[in-house]
Image (spheres, coloured by chain):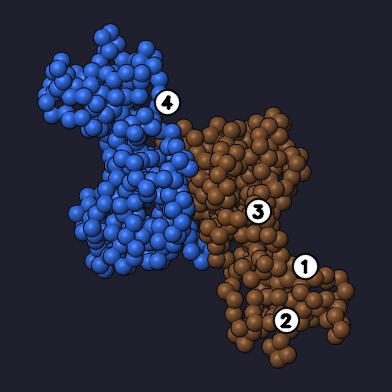
Chain colours: A brown, B blue
């Protein structure tokens, strides 16, 4: 999160419909997470595909697992049968996933994702696990609002004594991972969206450098990039009225294959948008 | 193959070094094949990484398996333990992978990948398996040069009687898959290459639309795009002299993750080049 604007990817709950193999499904969702992180997107929205297999629960779990720093996974993510192949997922290796370290190596001003491990105990304090050798006490105004198991971002406040303070996502000048959300209807979501919306579809306008530069200009603020399902293009999920409000682009013109998989289209499209967002 | 020019991707033999899981390795190689097909590349060259685990044999087998039409796999690809997870690979769905069909549905002029099933038999003829209900006789000048098990491209020559003629790759006006090759040294390969070479590296020049348009202009003919290994950038494989001859580009500037995986970089980079190749 760089403060100024939010970048969102929207994918259907039927993303994984083509394979029943749990490992392949896990890896497929993992690629969406990787794409979001590589291109610094702040939010992954899973919209419900009413006609196909709904895998949103599994997708959300894998996406949240991947966004959670390794040192907090045992604390924050319950063991589930569905997550048995997460070991083969590539790590994100983002700034919010530092390697475990010693508390003596911390620096004042350093940001960490933490989880409350003890709250309002005998010493009336809140302690936060941040991936160092011991939990760190929290310095905060309203200490009572924190409950054990809660995830929160902190900033190292002082070293001696070691203490951390809560910090808002918006005030962290680094890419800080993505949030995951499931929405019932793409139609309703886009109708309410304030972001500049790019619909990706084979039926869209062929992307040119001119068109891409326009996307870079118009998508400078909040940006939402929408991908269709393996079975149906984005147009199948939207009313004509909603379709006309947004630009629909074919980001892989002259494709050599009959179909392009969603995870492939995500990498291709975000790479193209990345080119022009940096120039604006 | 569109006749005019050849597009090549170069990846290291250490592509899969980060995972021992055979399914994950299979899928990783599968993504390279998918990228080649989606963006219509004619050749995948695996160059030897002398310092890391050499997986070129496995990579070549998976790549060749994927490029072989389904109806020829049993005939052309021996069963191997290493290929036990190929079932989870996505199909290419390219024009050279038609679904099996009836011979009565064939059209004169149609192209097919075939395999010789019988050669210079009692009838002195050559028969080719092309994925229809029965092998088709071949019409060719020098019938003796064909041996059973040989792969060859054919064109339907006549329907009654049904016959096919051999055809050169270059004369097929459709994307016709890729060839796979293993080379000992990237340095030597690039020194001899006549293609316009793009080296991709985090250390390269930040890609801009101007630079991308230049790549499109200079890479209009033969084009070779080189990717580094998970452990080392392309510069580690090349002499200073060779490096200076080619342009080195960072196609994913401002990446949110510490590393970008080769298969991710391949999709991103080929999508960017695809944008400008079409405009020239």
Q: Are marks 1 and 4 on the same chain?
A: no
Q: Which residue is mark 4?
A: B99
Host chain of mark 1: A
Q: Secondary structure at mark 4?
A: loop
CB within 8 Å, label 2 to label 3 = no
CB within 8 Å, label 2 to label 4 = no
Q: Nearer the viewer, residue A51 or B5?
A: A51
At a point 57% along the width and 47% down the height, the residue shown is A22
CB within 8 Å, label 1 to label 4 = no
Cα distance, mark 1 to mark 4? 53 Å
Q: Secondary structure at mark 1?
A: loop
* Label 2 vs 3, first from the N-terminus: 3
Asked if residue A141 is positioned above or below residue A151 in the image, the reply reads below
Could you classify mark 3 by the number of other residues whose Cα lies within 10 Å: few (under 14), some (14-19), or many (20 or more)?
few
* Label 1 vs 2, first from the N-terminus: 2
Could you classify mark 1 by the number of other residues whose Cα lies within 10 Å: few (under 14), some (14-19), or many (20 or more)?
few
Specify whether A154 is left or right of B48.
right
Picture quarter containing residue A33? bottom right
Image quadrant containing the N terminus of chain B: top left
Q: Which residue is mark 3?
A: A81
Front of the two marks 2 and 3 = 3
At a point 80% along the width and 76% down the height, the residue shown is A118
Asked if residue B13 is positioned above or below residue B168 in the image, the reply reads below
Image quadrant containing the C terminus of chain B: top left
At a point 87% along the width and 84% down the height, the residue shown is A122
Rendering coords of residue B161 (x, y %): 26, 9
Q: Secondary structure at mark 3?
A: helix
Q: Which residue is mark 1?
A: A150
* Label 3 vs 1, first from the N-terminus: 3
């Amino acid at each position: 999160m760089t403060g100024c604007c939010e970048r969102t990817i929207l994918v259907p709950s039927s993303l994984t419909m083509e394979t029943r193999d749990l490992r392949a499904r896990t890896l497929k969702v993992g690629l969406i997470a990787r794409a979001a992180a590589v291109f610094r997107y702040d939010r992954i929205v899973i919209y419900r595909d009413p006609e196909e297999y709904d895998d949103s629960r599994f997708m959300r779990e894998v996406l949240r697992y991947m966004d959670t720093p390794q040192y907090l996974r045992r604390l924050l993510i319950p063991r589930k049968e569905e997550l048995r192949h997460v070991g083969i997922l590539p790590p994100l290796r983002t700034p919010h996933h530092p390697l475990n370290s010693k508390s003596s190596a911390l620096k004042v001003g350093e940001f960490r994702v933490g989880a409350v491990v003890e709250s309002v105990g005998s010493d009336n304090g809140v302690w936060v696990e941040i991936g160092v050798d011991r939990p760190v006490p929290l310095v905060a105004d309203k200490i009572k609002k924190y409950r054990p198991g809660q995830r929160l971002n902190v900033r190292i406040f002082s070293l001696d004594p070691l203490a951390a303070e809560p910090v808002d996502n918006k005030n962290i000048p680094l890419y800080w991972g993505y949030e995951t959300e499931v929405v019932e209807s793409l139609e309703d979501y886009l109708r309410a969206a304030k972001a500049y919306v790019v619909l990706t579809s084979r039926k869209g306008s062929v992307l040119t450098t001119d068109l891409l530069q326009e996307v870079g200009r118009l998508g400078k603020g909040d940006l939402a990039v929408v991908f269709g399902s393996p079975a149906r293009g984005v147009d199948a999920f939207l009313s004509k009225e909603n379709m006309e409000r947004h630009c629909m682009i074919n980001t892989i013109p002259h494709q050599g294959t009959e179909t392009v998989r969603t995870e492939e289209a995500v990498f291709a499209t975000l790479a193209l948008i990345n080119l022009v967002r940096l120039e604006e």
